[in-house]
Image (cartoon, rainbow, N blue to C red):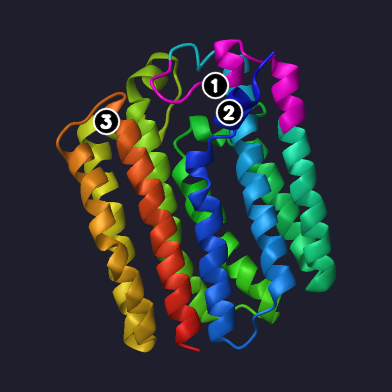
Amino acid sequence: MATPAQWLAGARPRTLPAALAPVLVGTGAAVALDGFRLVPALLALLVALALQVAVNYANDYSDGRRGTDAQRVGPMRLVGSGAATPRQVLLAAGAAFGLAALAGLALAALSSWWLVAVGAVCIVAAWTYTGGPLPYGYRALGEVFVFVFFGLVAVVGTTFAQTGSVDALAVAAAVPIGLLSVALLVVNNLRDLDGDAAVGKRTMAVLLGDRGTRLAYAALPVVAFAVVVGIGLERPWALLALLAVPLAVPPVRIVLTGGRGPVLIAALQGTGLLTLATGVLLGAGLALSG
């Protein structure tokens, strides 16, 4: 029987900035557009966090069933370590998906029923990342998923739930958050590169190789903050997000200097902090620009 601490570790809390940051930025855009609504913003946050936990448990279940977690460098996995049975982890994923669905229905009732369709697509995409007969996470498409759903869909969806419209500001603001969320996945897959390659899991890191993955990781925050500068030309307060740039230095240094194995866990933590700080600062900057 897994302990509460093991269940918490299995939920992978270090990935939660990827869920929190886009909601903060989307809400900041809603404030800038004079459409802020507290309850939809809180429901959007609940949906995002529940989906993140759900996809983490679903990933644990699917990878554990396939045997790809037999040898891991990173945080423990519930199924792969034997701490919990596949059925228990599947039920945990289902509970998190259910919470996300309920919060999503409430959010749709307060804004637009189109969000039901968006939520359904998000749930399907979350499950098929590593689940189902054709998991796209095994076909080097995980980064595309993260950018689309943790960037564009999360930010624009949060703004739309409050304002009732899709605005170019929200779309632009989604890009840096999406790129930093991709960086989280890239450094995670860099850490697991050798193990994934050994079991036939074809992530983008496996395709690019060690050097290519490290260069791609370093490029992501550069492009993300370049987009922030572009947004700042129209909304100068958005440049507050540049205060987060120094946080990019430690993880990028670890990656570019050849850090491997457990050392990359620090880079993952640093990337999570960078993503969260950028979300807070960009969200606040957009709100102040209204």
Residue pointed to by mark 2: 10
Q: Where is residue 77 in the image (x, y as percent from the top left)?
A: 54, 21
Residue pointed to by mark 3: 209
Residue type highlighted by circle 1:
Arg
Q: Classify mark 2: residues with Cα within 10 Å, few (<14), some (14-19) or many (20+).
A: many
Q: Earlier in the sequence, mark 2 or mark 1?
A: 2
Give the residue displayed 67% in from the left and 81% down from the top.
Answer: 163
Q: Is residue 78 magenta?
A: yes
Q: Earlier in the sequence, mark 1 or mark 3?
A: 1
Residue contact between numbered discs 1 and 3, judged by CB atoms under 8 Å: no
Q: What stretch is highlighted in magenta?
A: 72-92
Q: Which of marks 2 and 3 is nearer the N terminus?
A: 2
Quadrant housing residue 143:
top left
Residue pointed to by mark 1: 77
Q: Where is residue 142 in the image (x, y as percent from the top left)?
A: 49, 41
Q: Position of residue 105 (x, y in %)?
A: 83, 59
